[in-house]
Amino acid sequence: FSSGDPGPGILRTAYIHRERINPQVLQKLGKTVETKDEQFEQSAYNFQQQQIEGHKLYKDLRAFLSAVKVMHESSKKVAETLHEIYSMEWDGHADLKAIAESNDLLWEDYEEKLADQAVRTMENYITQFGEIKERIAKRGRKLVDYDSARHHLEALQNAKKKDEAKIAKAEEEFYKAQAVFEDLNKELREELPELYNSRIACYVTIFQNISNLRDIFYKEMSKLNHDLYEVMSKLEKQHSNKVFIIKGVSSNRRSLVISAPVRSPPPVLFTSPENAADGLPPLSPDNSTGSARAPKTSVEVHPDPAHASGSGPPDATGQNRPPPKPERTLSQSSREAEEDGGSEGSMEELDFSPKRTE
């Protein structure tokens, strides 16, 4: 070959490519029969769906982990800022630092285990798809070679003038192509259903890990939240004479409504032998009847000066609107709600006071 001519390797590749294309063209024209394997085709379709589902879940798990990292960083910054603005002479200053450190460690542990037990597990699961895809593609090429060799052999056998030497060589190539194709086809027919069924164990493992990690994380975080609540309660008692004032805001503004904190489990009540004999009600662990109430935080709401007169500002017709409701403290709202038997955390109340049963 000259420098401008293609080498033997290129010619061989072109020949193989032509030999593979011709049977496919003939199959589409109905001139020859294409080898079909319905069991393999179903397994290949299942594998394709398995890939789509696996990659989607992997993408969502990575997004979930990223969101956890963002929450970790945000929680850490809030805790650091609170520690900075918390005066040293305030009760609970030393406890606040320990709570912040424990909070950061808890987030770090949750983040690392979530990455290892969910994201990386899913990553290892979908990594095996690449090797299977290559083998399926190889099977497709070997199937074309097999059909091509069979078609070539049939053409020589059906020719009017038979060439036994060519027929013998064609038979040899046919059996060789058949053996390669059938071996690969048999392996994939066994492996693809097993791989498809393995997705169940994969999903079970990942979501059991996620459930366990979240359960532990929320329980430990709940303890830290309780500790932080206690620190704020100490500060409240230390400065019980301080009033939280909101100026220039209407008293019925819905954005001021704060939900009541989650109540602790009710104390276990027991009845002493003396009370049981006298028919008295059960006692709480502190030997006092009834439930102790947390002190109320007094919060004053100062309305906008424009609404402080006897009538409201004029509307579109130029007439004055009805005067706003008189201002009231949030502690008054709490007492009214208690007298009326209203539910806690109602959107109609302005109650900033902690409501927690000791």
Image (tube, rainbow, N blue to C red):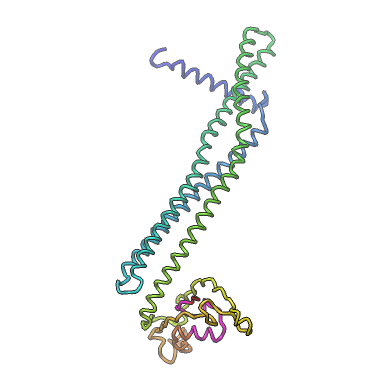
Rendered position, 58 above or below 167: below
Q: How many marks?
A: 0
The residue nearer to you, when weighing 80 against 94, is: 94
Q: Is residue 145 magenta?
A: no
The residue positioned farthest toward the bottom in the image shown:
310
Rendered position, 38 above or below 229: above
Q: Is residue 165 left or right of residue 112?
A: right
Q: Quadrant of residue 95?
A: bottom left
Q: Is residue 352 magenta?
A: yes
Which residue is found at the position 54% from the left and 86% from the top? 339
The residue nearer to you, when weighing 227 against 171, is: 227
Which residue is found at the position 38% from the left and 86% from the top? 305
Residue 67 position within the rendered picture, expressed as x and y whole percent measured from the top left: 45, 55
Residue 26 position within the rendered picture, expressed as x and y whole percent measured from the top left: 63, 24
The residue positioned farthest toward the left in the image shown:
88
Where are the magenta residues, as a range?
333-354
Which residue is found at the position 39% from the left and 77% from the top? 236
Residue 92 position within the rendered picture, expressed as x and y whole percent measured from the top left: 36, 71
Prevailing secondary structure of the magenta residues = loop
Which residue is found at the position 52% from the left and 33% from the top? 131
Q: Quadrant of residue 100?
A: bottom left
| Quadrant, the N terminus | top left
Rendered position, 31 above or below 61: above
The residue nearer to you, when weighing 233 against 185, is: 233
Residue 180 position within the rendered picture, expressed as x and y whole percent measured from the top left: 59, 22
The residue nearer to you, when weighing 195 against 136, is: 195
